[in-house]
């Protein structure tokens, strides 16, 4: 029986990937690295530092830790200049309706995101009050596919992992949910998210009926 839903943020509730892309692209240009939208796909669901490592690998650049921290901070400041301008119009289709349906039926909801900017984004989207628990990149030490972020979500909600469903757009996130003993709905293509119990294109395709059939 499903008692709680845990949502990833980027790619599930909102599409921040384009802002991440603009900010990483600017940094790449400054470093003389060629960085395409296809390369950006590899950064989805991955932590900020790991994203920078992937970018540097693309340019065959090796830098000392302190320099890497400076660059990650620079990228984040640029990225934040975009997310600070976000509005509730940017909530992905169907997300708010589905959240509303869950709450109307007494299900609990949590956020399980790798982003350290998740609170800012939820506030900008005016979604914060809907969440019973928020676990973001500031509260976890192990990145997806480690299940830590989702297990902490279940724990905060006081719900057994087997009664939780995770919504995820990244392959590593699907794996994290399954490793945590939870049900998982993949958001995106069945080709990459095939291990999930169900794959849909977006939350606009979800409803309580489908949830209860998982
Ligand atoms: P930040 P999610 C992830 O969020 C993004 O998909 C990923 O591209 C980003 O690098 C990561 O958050 C860290 O974000 O730089 O804001 O801490 O999909 O787990 O909600
Ligand atoms: Mg994501």
Image (cartoon, rainbow, N blue to C red):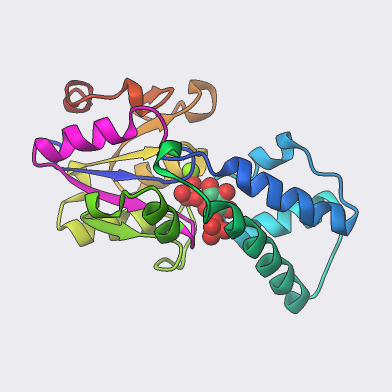
Say if the magenta span includes residue 67. Answer: no
Which residue is at 73% across, 40% downward? 39
In the image: residue 99, left or right of residue 105? right
Instruction: Out of 61 and 122, give the one closest to the viewer.
Output: 122
Whether 26 is drawn above or below 97: the answer is below
Residue 51 pos. (x, y %): 66, 55
Residue placed furthest toward the right = 32
Work out whether 30 lies above or below 202: below
The residue that appears at 30% across and 60% down in the rendered structure is: 152
In the picture, measured across the screen, residue 35 lies left or right of residue 87, that is right
Q: Is residue 136 visible?
A: yes
Q: Quadrant of the C terminus?
A: top left
Q: Farthest bottom residue? A: 66
Looking at the image, how many numbered discs can be counted on the residues?
0
User: What stretch of residues is rendered in magenta?
Assistant: 92-117
Tell me if residue 147 can be seen. no
Is the residue 66 above or below the residue 177 in the image?
below
Residue 38 placement (x, y as % from top left): 72, 34
Magenta-drawn stretch contains 107: yes
- The residue drawn where x is 52% and y is 56% is 84
């Amino acid at each position: 029986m499903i008692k709680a839903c845990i949502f990833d943020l980027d790619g599930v509730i909102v599409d921040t990937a384009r802002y991440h892309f603009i900010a990483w692209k600017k940094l790449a240009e400054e470093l003389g690295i060629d960085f395409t939208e296809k390369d950006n796909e590899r950064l989805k669901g991955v932590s900020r530092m790991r994203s920078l490592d992937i970018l540097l690998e693309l340019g065959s650049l090796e830098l000392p830790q302190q320099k890497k921290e400076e660059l990650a901070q620079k990228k984040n400041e640029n990225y934040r200049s975009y997310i600070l301008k976000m509005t509730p119009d940017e909530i992905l289709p169907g997300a708010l309706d589905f959240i509303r349906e869950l709450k109307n039926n007494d299900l609990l909801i949590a956020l399980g995101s790798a982003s350290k900017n998740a609170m800012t984004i939820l506030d900008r989207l005016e979604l914060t009050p809907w969440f019973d628990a928020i676990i973001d990149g500031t509260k976890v030490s192990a990145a997806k596919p480690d299940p830590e972020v989702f297990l902490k979500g279940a724990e905060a909600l006081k719900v057994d992992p087997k009664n939780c469903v995770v919504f995820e757009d990244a392959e590593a996130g699907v794996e994290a949910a399954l490793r945590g003993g939870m049900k998982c709905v993949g958001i995106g293509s069945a080709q990459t998210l095939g291990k999930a119990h169900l794959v849909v294109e977006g939350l606009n395709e979800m409803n309580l009926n489908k949830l209860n059939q998982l």
